[in-house]
Image (cartoon, rainbow, N blue to C red):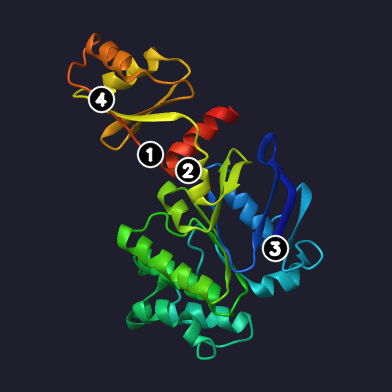
Amino acid sequence: MNFVEINNISKSYGTHKALHETSFSVKKGELFGVIGPDGAGKTTLFRILTTLLLADSGSAKIAGLDILKDYKKIRQIVGYMPGKFSLYQDLTIEENLAFFATIFGTTIKENYELIKDIYIQIEPFKDRQAGKLSGGMKQKLALSCALIHKPEILILDEPTTGVDAVSRTEFWDLLRRFKDMGITIIVSTPYMDEASLCDRVALMQEGKIMQIDTPANIIKNYKPELLAIHSNNMHDLLVKLRNYNINSQVYLFGQTVHFSSNERINQSDLKNYLQNNGHPNTEINTCSPTIEDCFLWLMKQHN
């Protein structure tokens, strides 16, 4: 059963097209990721879904409710966490949470069990102003405020951007817990490694969906041969590899360069080429692709 239906949503800002006829669906209880860099159109899409922005064309429904006709009802069942911290900086943690509970006609006490796992981590600081919190604590407060009215769906715009690695891990643990409670979750992120934590993902670039599938299937459907190459001079290695085959894709990946091509790569010929061009001690290994490799390859196909 599809809980969210998005059909051919488009949005432009002047001459810039932020979304190009975007369509996808999300099942009830699914943890769905929208993965893409800054400028991909993620925030525009989420603001349209949460009834804060009008699309130029297309339609969308959440729980059978139309985002235009039923926007008041949608706002009652959606918990939204925008990318930019937007709570009241001069109010304390407890005052912010009480304010949002009041807006939705509830109280902190009534839904405390729902937010308990997050709130107990910041409750010792409940009298501290929101503007004086760390990034991780702001994130937990914003999520608590998004959950306080017991929403059916959470829409989270880049919730882990700018927080430390430990807080990121804790946050995704919480999302899986909410998913187990039956809450549908749509989350955007620029971090490719977070894609593997979702049930399904939409890979998005320049307002277009390039592929939608499970992370495992996206990796499985990656066609090119992929090599991880290391040398003493990585910058020059990039240049030499780009000159080797104009149809290949070459980019730094940690301590190696990832080199991929639709054509079969003769590793012996490649090694000889690099040895003859200033790289006598090159290591070349076949490697398995990551979501980031898949994303970069899809970008090349869509250009």
Q: Which corner quadrant holds the C terminus?
A: top right
For the question of whether residue 152 can be seen, the reply is yes
For the question of whether residue 37 can be seen, the reply is no
Q: Nearer the viewer, mark 3 or mark 1?
A: 1
**C-alpha distance separating marks 2 and 4:** 26 Å
Q: Is residue 216 above or below residue 27?
A: above
Q: Residue furthest bottom?
A: 109
Residue underneath mark 2: 219
Question: Where residue 5 appears, x then y in whole percent?
Answer: 72, 58
**C-alpha distance separating marks 4 and 1:** 21 Å
Identify the mark nearer the N-term, 4 or 3. Answer: 3
Question: Where residue 294 appears, x then y in whole percent?
Answer: 48, 38
**C-alpha distance separating marks 2 and 3:** 24 Å
**C-alpha distance separating marks 4 and 3:** 47 Å
Residue underneath mark 4: 234
How crowded is the residue under tag 1: few (<14 C-alpha within 10 Å), some, or many (20+)?
A: few
Identify the mark nearer the N-term, 4 or 1. Answer: 4
How crowded is the residue under tag 4: few (<14 C-alpha within 10 Å), some, or many (20+)?
A: some
Question: Where residue 209 appears, x then y in whole percent?
Answer: 62, 42
Identify the mark nearer the N-term, 2 or 4. Answer: 2
Number of numbered discs overlaid on the protein picture: 4
**Residue 38 shown left or right of residue 133 in the figure:** right
Q: Which corner quadrant holds the N terminus?
A: bottom right
**Residue 193 shown left or right of residue 80 in the figure:** left
How crowded is the residue under tag 2: few (<14 C-alpha within 10 Å), some, or many (20+)?
A: some
Amino acid type for the residue under numbered disc 2: Ile
Q: Is residue 115 above or below residue 242?
A: below
Identify the mark nearer the N-term, 2 or 3. Answer: 3
Secondary element at image label 2 = helix
Amino acid type for the residue under numbered disc 1: Ser
